[in-house]
Image (tube, rainbow, N blue to C red):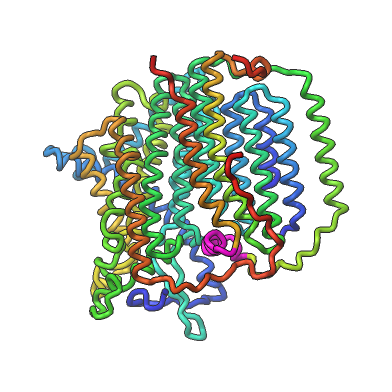
């Protein structure tokens, strides 16, 4: 599937002074993704301030540094020097564990995003394609969903360890919101997995590198183009579902009732000051980056350029990836400035009663369309247990008796 | 490749820890958690033996056991919550009769 | 890694605070997920984290926290006479297990091949699950009904009577 993924403009040698280069890719990728996530967060905070100010028709930060560029640094210095209060009756270890857990799982989910495809040419001349990921596991998508499930713990533990009834309830409500929208997110992603045939993120990107809808008569320009990405290939609805679910998962824009409560009554991070609060804040932005990255990789083609023509092709893939992430984040901030906040029961209503059925119906629809395209010709798939297997006891009827 | 019987011993140890937990603890929620621990130990045994014989049957069982455990946890916790609402205590030594 | 899982399982049983027990159980589940990966059951590892550590334990934590909210004193533990007996029996069982494993010869896996790495991938599991020749299709369909029954049951149990 990987042959002529894009017009590869340069290939790296496989061996370089005796070092096997494709083996180094995960380590370089770790450094890149860590650095990228952590370094982009201050920039994101600044960008958010500027864009919201623009939407709300006022000047943004303009005091600190030229056009307010040092604003985030000023903010972090302020947060750093704030007094680190710890209320006396909290459960100490859990209290310190919660923000760390939130940040850790957010960062860990970054590990499988495919930023680029690297091409290595070894001595025999064969091209080896390696995606620039920390680990290209063949359950890539499931791994990100699993890390999102673990992120719930950060919120729940923060709410509980604050030893404050309002915090606890706020934390439980926030985590209920997170769990509900995990379902819609999973269903939307499942639609894409159905089309791509694999959970590996690099396979999903490679499956978007075909001519739109498999029409062979189009010219090569349209290969891997914007019309063959899965936002169109899955007929539009799963992108919308996934985008709404991702905004709800990161507790942002119209779904940020847990955060707003922290300004009004209490929220799960009321009792957290200075660095711990900064860590929660950071974990929110990092998870924003992660889900936008997943959105870009799965629905919007990841490292693929919008058209397969020369100037766009020569731009390395990860720049396209970063550009798509930035566009996603711009939409995030745009929504924050524009749409009013959803009330909690309206939020739950949306998640369970509207998005879940739509996701299920769309899954069946896509499965049906897939079946129409390549009908089963009655050949039984091979039995993976190639050896004569031990006689498994047939399950008896599980009816009630 | 780690020999399979290491995994079996490990699963056995986890299982006994679960059993001890069920026998010793008084809080029914924690007892329930130890039951989950026992289920996990059994799942681990299945996967280890499945890999030993090179078949997927081990993992298939675990998938279903996982689904059934999820269902059972939700119902069981519902029972515990109801029990707690009735009597204001969930110390298992005091609620061991089915009356009320 | 084995030490981590056994240690956290012990802490589940030992710790007095039910929230700490729940958290140690989460650590145990994560350790078991790592074991699944070493046993080349990658799909199962991800599903374990998503379902057990991600959903079931969150449910446990919800219940513990809500019960703590209304009666914080109801969840403490006291020592009883059962403890030494349980510990003794448990120790005997573990000793028997270890001794038997040292003496036992595993039946030589005549069936174990070198394509074991592929054993747990999604494709393989999917082929086994949906194959009409293998017995796994029927439980798959029944499980969906089972989950539906569980959802209905949980809602019925937790409903308060509207007087």
| Towards the viewer: A315 or A42 | A315
Q: Residue at x 72, y 36 (%)?
A: B17
- A328 vs B99: above or below: below
Q: Residue at x 54, y 36 (%)?
A: C57
- A144 vs A120: above or below: above
- Horizontal side of A111 relative to B1 (left or right) equals left
Q: Is residue C68 magenta?
A: no
| Towards the viewer: A114 or C13 | C13
Residue A31 seen in this snapshot: no
Q: Residue furthest front?
A: A401
Q: Position of residue A367 (x, y in %)?
A: 37, 61
- Horizontal side of B73 relative to A213 (left or right) equals right
Q: Residue at x 67, y 60 (%)?
A: B51
Residue B57 seen in this snapshot: yes
Point out the stretch of residues depicted in magenta. Answer: C117-133
Q: Main secondary structure of the magenta part?
A: helix
| Towards the viewer: A276 or C109 | C109
Quadrant of the rendering where the N terminus of chain A is positioned:
bottom left
Q: Position of residue A380 (x, y in %)?
A: 52, 71
């Amino acid at each position: 599937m990987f042959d002529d993924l894009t017009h590869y403009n340069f290939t790296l040698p496989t061996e370089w002074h005796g070092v096997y280069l494709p083996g180094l890719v995960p380590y370089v990728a770790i450094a890149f993704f860590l650095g990228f996530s952590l370094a982009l967060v201050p920039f994101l905070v600044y960008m958010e301030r500027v864009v919201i100010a623009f939407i709300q028709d006022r000047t943004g930060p303009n005091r600190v540094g030229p056009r307010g560029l040092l604003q985030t640094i000023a903010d972090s210095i302020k947060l750093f020097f704030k007094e680190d209060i710890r209320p006396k009756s909290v459960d100490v270890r859990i209290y310190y564990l919660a923000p760390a857990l939130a940040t850790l799982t957010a960062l860990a989910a970054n590990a499988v995003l495919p930023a680029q495809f690297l091409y290595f040419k070894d001595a025999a001349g064969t091209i080896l394609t390696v995606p620039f990921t920390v680990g290209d596991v063949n359950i890539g998508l499931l791994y990100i969903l699993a890390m999102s499930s673990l992120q719930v713990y950060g919120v729940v533990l923060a709410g509980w360890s604050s030893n404050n009834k309002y915090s606890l309830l706020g934390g439980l409500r926030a985590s209920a919101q997170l769990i509900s929208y995990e379902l819609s997110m999973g269903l939307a992603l499942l639609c894409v997995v159905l089309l791509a045939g694999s959970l590996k993120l690099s396979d999903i990107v490679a499956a978007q590198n075909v001519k739109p809808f498999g029409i062979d008569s189009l010219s090569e320009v349209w290969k891997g183009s914007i019309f063959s990405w899965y936002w169109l290939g899955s007929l539009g609805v799963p992108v919308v579902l996934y985008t709404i679910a991702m905004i709800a998962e990161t507790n942002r824009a119209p779904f940020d009732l847990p955060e707003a409560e922290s300004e009004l009554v209490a929220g799960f991070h009321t009792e957290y000051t200075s660095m711990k609060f900064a860590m929660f804040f950071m974990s929110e932005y990092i998870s924003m980056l992660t889900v936008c990255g997943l959105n870009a990789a799965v629905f919007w083609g990841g490292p693929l350029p919008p058209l397969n023509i020369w100037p766009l092709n020569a731009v390395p893939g990860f720049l396209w990836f970063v550009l798509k992430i930035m566009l996603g984040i711009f939409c995030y901030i745009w929504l924050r400035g524009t749409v009013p906040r959803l009330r909690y029961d309206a939020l739950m209503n949306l998640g369970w009663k509207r998005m879940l059925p739509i996701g299920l119906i769309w899954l069946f629809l896509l499965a049906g369309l897939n079946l129409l395209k390549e009908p089963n010709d009655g050949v039984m798939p091979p039995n993976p247990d190639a050896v004569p297997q031990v006689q498994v006891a047939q399950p008896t009827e599980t009816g009630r008796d | 490749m780690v020999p399979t019987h290491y995994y079996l011993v490990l699963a056995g140890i986890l299982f006994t820890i679960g059993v001890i937990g069920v026998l010793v603890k008084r809080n029914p929620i924690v007892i329930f958690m130890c039951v989950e621990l026992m289920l996990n130990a059994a799942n681990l045994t299945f996967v280890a033996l499945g890999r030993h014989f090179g078949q997927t049957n081990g993992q298939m069982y675990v998938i279903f056991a996982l689904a059934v455990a999820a269902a059972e946890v939700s119902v069981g916790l519902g029972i515990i919550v109801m029990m707690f609402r009735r009597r204001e205590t969930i110390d298992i030594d005091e609620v061991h009769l089915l009356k009320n | 890694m084995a030490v981590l899982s056994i240690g956290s399982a012990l802490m589940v049983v030992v710790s007095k605070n039910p929230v700490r027990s729940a958290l140690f159980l989460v650590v145990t589940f994560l350790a078991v997920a790592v074991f699944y990966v070493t046993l080349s059951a990658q799909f199962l590892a991800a599903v374990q984290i998503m379902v057990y550590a991600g959903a079931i334990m969150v449910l446990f934590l919800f219940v513990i926290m809500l019960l703590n909210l209304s009666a914080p004193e109801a969840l403490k533990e006291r020592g009883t006479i059962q403890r030494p007996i349980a510990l003794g029996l448990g120790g005997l069982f573990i000793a028997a297990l270890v001794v038997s494993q040292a003496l036992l010869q595993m039946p030589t896996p005549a069936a174990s091949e070198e394509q074991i790495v592929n054993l747990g991938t999604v494709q393989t599991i999917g082929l086994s699950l949906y194959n009409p020749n293998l017995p796994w299709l029927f439980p798959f369909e029944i499980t969906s009904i089972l989950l539906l029954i569980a959802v209905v049951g949980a809602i019925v149990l937790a409903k308060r009577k509207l007087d």
